[in-house]
Image (spheres, rainbow, N blue to C red):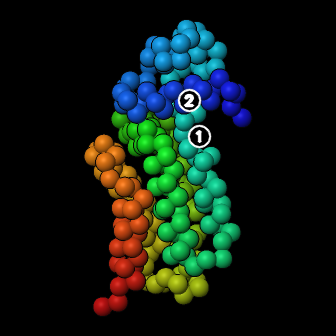
Amino acid sequence: MLTERQQEILEHAIDLIAEKGIQGLTMKNLSKRLGISEPAIYRHYDNKIEILLSLLDYFTNSTSGIFNDQSLSHLNAVERLKIIFNKHFEALEHTPALVAVIFSEEIFRNEAILSNKVKLIMERNAASIAAIIEEGKQKGELDLSIDTQQLTTIFMGSLRLLVKRWQMCNFDFNLKQEGEALFDTLNQLVNYKS
């Protein structure tokens, strides 16, 4: 559980990332933004990496309910996957700066602790999606001949690429709307009968 001050630091860190990119998140910039000294920040976070880890936890906590809800849902597999897609797009539209944290390969490549954290998040998300796909296959909602792991990669990779394009376009299109169209296309491909 975050303290009130830690939450405030994270909110300002997100704002800094939104304005200046991930490289703009420094203890100096953060202390100026908060109107406090750098040592005051160090009382709550040891370093920038710890702040980034906390941001990853924040996003994970805000989206873990999405997977939990859908793992217990009685909707069909396609509807459940669509909800997961849409809820992620909604969460990212609400806090676009998190895209710079979640999809910043350059910072994760050099920081093993961040890299491992992102890997765990991806593995957990992939396992949740794969479980829904498997259940859908067993219920006859999805084609048994389609490999579950490949389909999981296609869904996750499509989501990731769309979000990255949204970031590169300075968030200038409706992510949720584009995401719905993308999901509908993926659904058509999965259900295509020659």
Q: Position of residue 64 (x, y in %)?
A: 62, 53
- Left or right: residue 141 compared with residue 22: right
Residue 49 visible? The answer is no
Q: Position of residue 13 (x, y in %)?
A: 49, 27
Query: Residue type at mark 1?
Result: Tyr
Label at residue 187: none
- Vertical position of residue 111 compared to residue 180: above or below: above
In this view, the residue in front, 129 or 39, is 39
- Left or right: residue 26 compared with residue 11: left
- Vertical position of residue 19 compared to residue 34: above or below: below
Q: Are marks 2 and 1 in contact (CB under 8 Å)?
A: yes
Tally of marks: 2
Q: Which residue is mark 1?
A: 58
Dot 2 falls on a residue whose secondary structure is helix
Q: Which image quarter: residue 138?
A: bottom right
Residue 3 visible? The answer is yes
- Vertical position of residue 183 compared to residue 136: above or below: above
Query: Residue type at mark 2?
Result: Leu
- Vertical position of residue 68 compared to residue 54: above or below: below
Image point 43% across, 43% down: which residue? 96
Of all residues shown, which one is farthest toward the bottom? 194
In this view, the residue in front, 163 or 143, is 163
Image point 48% across, 32% down: which residue? 14
**Could you give the CA–CA distance between mark 2 and mark 1, rounded to whole angstroms?**
9 Å
Label at residue 10: 2
Image point 64% across, 15% down: which residue? 43
